[in-house]
Image: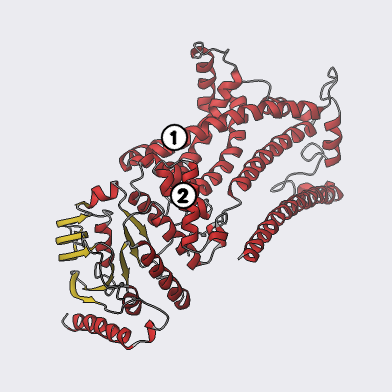
């Protein structure tokens, strides 16, 4: 028996190592793709430029695909060097520092939005679990809430935030309104996957809880909530990326300065004098999205590594 | 010598089922008469098997005893009280065909689950879990997760969990249905050992004739649509051992149960 135990431990150790290896492989593949994309971009640009004069006569380049001039497609090296340069003459910091600061600002908005969206989504899922009627009645409104354009509600939320939040013990900041906008986007996938996950508990396990005369609360905490975690993590991944989108769009349409949204807006309006700056700030947003997605994935690994799909079946 | 066949001296009834009928979807086009006019008394400390073809209502009958479903007519009394009260008093443990282990809990934590729900403190839980692990011979596997165990081991954990709070009644619904024949026979021997050690009342649903005969004092044969009790056969095999499966008495009892099942089949 002891040897069996040791074998199991060895297997567990091996699995952990394997997981790390998988993680490393993922990063390597990601970087390889990044290089491949850069090569594709540069290659396409070089090809377009080699037939520069003929571009307008080619049926595809310049009509369907973008033109290859430096305004439309700044060289990758320009974007990289631009990161090290100050974006304006009077500033001492390089562009990378501006983007990093703006990313942190946006990250904070998104993180609060994600947290409150997660809480709201879970609360809604638990309420819907309690009653089929509430689920049926509420679902259409939840769906409808997601079809209202953010551009329409963002200014309302920002104004409402600054006007009606005076009762709070702290000063209401515009970025908090942006967090509310991010919340508005993040609660939805959590609520939808949450209800599905809570209902996914094994019927035999549900009967078992009934046979123990377990209370609803006990059944929720000990069975339904743990059973819903795979669904919830899928939702959290979606919610994390959507919270960044919500924060950026919220900043832009709510006119809130300090984050990536304002930065992108600024550099877009001055695109002709420096297209690389816009490219660089958009990449900042992309990196931020990958970072939050990665944070959820790592958390998921630590919470879920001891489980395996379909392991409850004999 | 025949300890196996004699119920305890004060033969109180563990389960009393009185003219019970169960109709699903009553009054709807898809109405199903699952059980009809069932009378059954199970004495304390006996091992009773319910056997019959699929759809004969044997699982429904078991679920009625556990108050997981309720009779359309008639009454189900468990330990002298209503089945619902018995459920609330945690008078019975239950094991299903799927082990229903929580994959995010270790073996020990799974066994502790009912105790935790009943508000036992940590030390007591730990102690009882260890005791149960010993009983089902899985002492080395307390810290493992269910996925690391074979199907038979998972079922043993499920049985340990069902017995952890020492209910006097154990309801088992085809607990070995998904196991291979060899594991199954092994598990049968183990369940009998547990039964002999603990003297629980066990109600065991199966569709295997040898399994029913090997395990029980009494085999209740059921017929389908609507589910009725077709025969109530006592199995006088005494204490089971390795040779029991090859004894004449074993084959005689198997034949008796088989005849009862066949007779039911031909009258339909």
- Label 1 sits on a secondary structure element that is helix
- A46 left or right of A124? right
Q: Which residue is mark 1?
A: A123
Quarter of the image containing the N terminus of chain A?
bottom right
Q: How many marks?
A: 2
Q: Nearer the viewer, mark 2 or mark 1?
A: 2
Separation (CA) of disc 2 from disc 1: 28 Å
Q: Is residue B72 visible?
A: no
Nearest the viewer among A59 and A43 is A43
Measuring from the top left, give residue B148's x and y in whole percent.
Answer: 57, 61
- Residue at (43% x, 55% y) in the render: B161
Q: Which residue is mark 2?
A: B112
- Residue at (63% x, 30% y) in the render: A248
Residue at the outermost bottom position: B248
Q: Is residue B263 above or below residue B72?
A: below
Tag on residue B32?
none
- Residue at (46% x, 41% y) in the render: B121
Residue at the outermost front position: B1
Q: Is residue B259 above or below residue B11?
A: below
The reply to the same-chain question for discs 2 and 1 is no
- Label 2 sits on a secondary structure element that is helix
**Chain letter behind tag 2:** B
**Chain letter behind tag 1:** A
């Amino acid at each position: 028996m002891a040897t069996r135990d040791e074998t199991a431990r060895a297997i567990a150790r091996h699995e952990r190592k394997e997981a790390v290896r998988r993680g490393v492989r993922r990063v390597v593949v990601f970087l390889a793709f990044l290089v491949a994309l850069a090569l594709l971009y540069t290659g396409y640009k070089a090809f377009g430029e080699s037939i520069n004069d003929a571009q307008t006569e080619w049926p595809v380049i310049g009509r369907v695909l973008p033109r290859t001039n430096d305004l439309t497609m700044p060289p990758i090296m320009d974007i990289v060097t631009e990161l090290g340069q100050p974006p304006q003459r009077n500033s001492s910091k390089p562009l990378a520092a501006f983007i990093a600061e703006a990313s942190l600002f946006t990250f904070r908005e998104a993180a609060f939005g994600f947290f409150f969206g997660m809480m709201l989504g879970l609360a809604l899922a638990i309420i819907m679990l309690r009653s089929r009627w509430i689920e049926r009645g509420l679902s259409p409104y939840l769906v409808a809430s997601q079809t209202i354009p953010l551009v329409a509600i963002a200014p309302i939320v920002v104004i409402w935030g600054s006007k009606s939040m005076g009762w709070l013990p702290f000063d209401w900041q515009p970025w908090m309104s942006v967090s509310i906008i991010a919340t508005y986007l993040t609660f939805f996938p959590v609520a939808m996957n949450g209800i599905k996950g809570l209902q996914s508990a094994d019927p035999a396990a549900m009967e078992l809880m009934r046979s123990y005369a377990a209370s609803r609360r006990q059944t929720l905490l000990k069975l339904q909530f743990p059973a819903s975690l795979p669904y919830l993590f899928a939702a959290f991944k979606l919610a994390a990326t959507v919270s960044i989108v919500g924060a950026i769009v919220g900043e832009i349409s709510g006119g809130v300065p300090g984050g990536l949204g304002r930065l992108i807006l600024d550099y877009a309006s001055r695109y002709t004098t420096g297209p690389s700056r816009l490219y660089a700030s958009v990449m900042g947003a992309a990196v931020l999205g990958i970072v939050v997605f990665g944070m959820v994935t790592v958390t998921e690994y630590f919470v879920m590594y001891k489980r395996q799909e379909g392991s409850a079946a004999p | 010598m025949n300890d196996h066949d004699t119920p305890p001296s004060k033969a109180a009834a563990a389960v009393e089922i009185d003219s019970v009928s169960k109709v699903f979807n009553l009054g709807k086009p898809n109405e199903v008469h699952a059980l009809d006019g069932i009378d059954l008394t199970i004495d304390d400390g006996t091992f009773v098997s319910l056997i019959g073809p699929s759809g004969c209502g044997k699982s429904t009958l078991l679920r009625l005893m556990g108050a997981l479903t309720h009779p359309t007519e008639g009454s189900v009394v468990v330990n002298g009280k209503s089945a619902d009260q018995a459920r609330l008093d945690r008078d019975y443990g239950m094991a299903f065909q799927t082990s229903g282990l929580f994959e995010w809990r270790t073996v020990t934590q799974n066994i502790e689950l009912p105790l935790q729900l009943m508000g036992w403190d940590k030390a007591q839980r730990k102690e009882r879990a260890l005791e149960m692990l010993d009983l089902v011979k899985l002492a080395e596997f307390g810290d493992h997760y269910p996925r690391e165990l074979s199907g038979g081991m998972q079922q043993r954990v499920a049985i340990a969990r069902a017995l952890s709070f020492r209910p006097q009644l154990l309801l088992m619904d085809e607990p070995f249905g998904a196991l291979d024949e060899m594991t199954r026979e092994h598990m049968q021997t183990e369940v009998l050992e547990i039964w002999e050690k603990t003297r629980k009342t066990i109600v065991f649903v199966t569709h295997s004739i040898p399994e029913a005969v090997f395990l029980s004092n009494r085999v209740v044969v059921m017929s389908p649509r609507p589910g009725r009790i077709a025969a109530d056969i006592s199995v006088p095999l005494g204490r089971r051992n390795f040779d029991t499966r090859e004894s004449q008495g074993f084959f005689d009892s198997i034949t008796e149960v088989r005849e009862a099942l066949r007779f039911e089949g031909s009258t339909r």
